[in-house]
Image (spheres, rainbow, N blue to C red):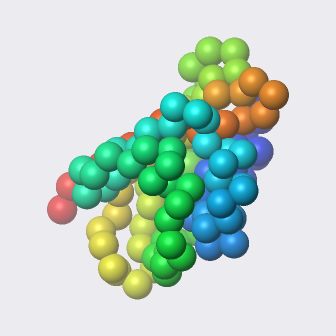
């Protein structure tokens, strides 16, 4: 399992220079990508690649990141996102990455941490 690559890919989703680059997002998100956000909102692939740039409030590197191999060429990345400036609370996050010709993000879910 290529843990460093998956960590870099996951963190790229939090960096403005890649997160708001439509071509990058189209290349990295799987065709059936779906996200359940921290607010409970469901985001499609098209919702995600078309986002207008906004400030991203998160501490990098991502906290408590671990990579779990679910099957050959399928990995779950789990971590905690923590805001730098307190714009929203911390969240437990889980991403499913699938490798065909390259790693692509298939699914992401965020759950607010207990207060």
The location of residue 60, given as percent across then percent down, is 59, 69
For residue 23, above or below residue 108:
below
The location of residue 84, given as percent across then percent down, is 46, 79
Residue 3 appears in which quarter of the rendering? top right
Residue 32 visible here: yes
The location of residue 16, given as percent across then percent down, is 62, 73
Q: Residue 74 vs residue 48: left or right?
A: right
Number of numbered callouts drawn: 0
For residue 103, above or below residue 39:
above
Residue at the spot x=62%, y=15% of the render? Answer: 71
Residue at the spot x=56%, y=49% of the render? Answer: 65
For residue 5, above or below residue 72:
below
Q: Among all residues in the image, which is located at the extreme bottom? A: 85
Residue at the spot x=81%, y=28% of the render? Answer: 101
Residue 70 appears in which quarter of the rendering? top right
Q: Among all residues in the image, which is located at the extreme right? A: 101
The location of residue 91, given as percent across then percent down, is 35, 57
Q: Residue 55 vs residue 5: left or right?
A: left
Q: Residue 19 vs residue 88: left or right?
A: right
Q: Among all residues in the image, which is located at the extreme left? A: 115
Residue 67 visible here: no
Image quadrant containing the N terminus: top right
Image quadrant containing the C terminus: bottom left
Q: Quick one: 19 or 77, which is closer to the camera?
A: 19
Residue 112 appears in which quarter of the rendering? bottom left
């Amino acid at each position: 399992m290529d843990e460093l690559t998956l960590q870099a890919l996951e963190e790229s989703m939090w960096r403005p220079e890649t997160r708001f680059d439509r071509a990058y997002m189209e290349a990295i998100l799987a065709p059936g990508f779906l996200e359940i956000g921290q607010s409970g909102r469901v985001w499609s692939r098209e919702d995600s690649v078309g986002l207008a740039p906004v400030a991203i409030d998160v501490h990098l590197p991502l906290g408590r990141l671990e990579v779990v191999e679910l099957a050959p060429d399928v990995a779950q990345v789990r971590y905690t996102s923590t805001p730098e400036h307190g714009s929203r609370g911390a969240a437990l996050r889980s991403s499913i990455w699938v490798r065909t010709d390259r790693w692509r993000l298939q699914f992401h879910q965020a759950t607010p941490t207990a207060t």
